Amino acid sequence: MSAKNTGGPAFPETCGDQIIPGMTLRDYFAAKAMQGFAADPDCENGAQAAKTAYEWADAMLAERAK
């Protein structure tokens, strides 16, 4: 099984000589998709929305890698 492409850190920060990676780009993309789903009054299945959000995030990362 290969590791999931996370896109690397979305908003890394430095604190002295330490790098704090923060959330992954995959998580950021999924969170943005979830914002849209949450704004839809007809979206009732949060678990399915979360699954779809990560599917969309994976698709965005795949497209980004081309």
Image: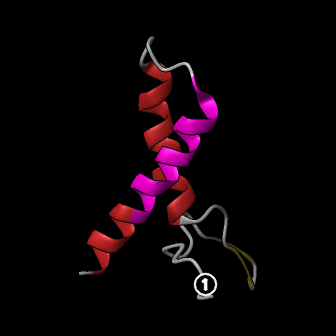
Q: Quadrant of residue 8?
A: bottom right
Q: Nearer the viewer, residue 62 or 11?
A: 62
At x 63%, y 88%, the residue is 1
Q: Amino acid at mark 1?
A: Ala
Query: Tag 1's secondary structure?
Result: loop
Q: How is the image coloured?
A: secondary structure
Which residue position is annotated with label 1?
3
At x 57%, y 77%, the residue is 4
Magenta stretch containing residue 56, yes or no? yes
Residue located farthest toward the left when viewing the structure as drawn: 66
- Badge 1 crowding class, 10 Å Cα cut-off, few under 14, some 14 to 19, many 20 or more, is few
Residue located farthest toward the top when viewing the structure as drawn: 41
Q: Name the dominant secondary structure of the magenta segment.
A: helix
Q: Is residue 64 left or right of residue 12?
A: left
Residue 3, how many percent across, how many down?
61, 84
Q: On screen, 28 above or below 1?
A: above
Residue 13, how many percent across, how many down?
63, 69
Q: Is residue 50 left or right of residue 19?
A: left
At x 34%, y 62%, the residue is 60
Residues rendered magenta in the picture:
45-58
Q: Is residue 22 left or right of residue 61?
A: right
Magenta stretch containing residue 49, yes or no? yes
Q: On screen, 4 above or below 34?
A: below
Q: How many numbered circles does the render carry? A: 1
Q: Nearer the viewer, residue 6 or 8?
A: 6
Residue 40, how many percent across, how many down?
42, 18
Q: Quadrant of residue 39?
A: top left
Residue 50, how many percent across, how many down?
57, 42
At x 61%, y 30%, the residue is 46
Q: Quadrant of the C terminus?
A: bottom left
Q: Quadrant of residue 16?
A: bottom right
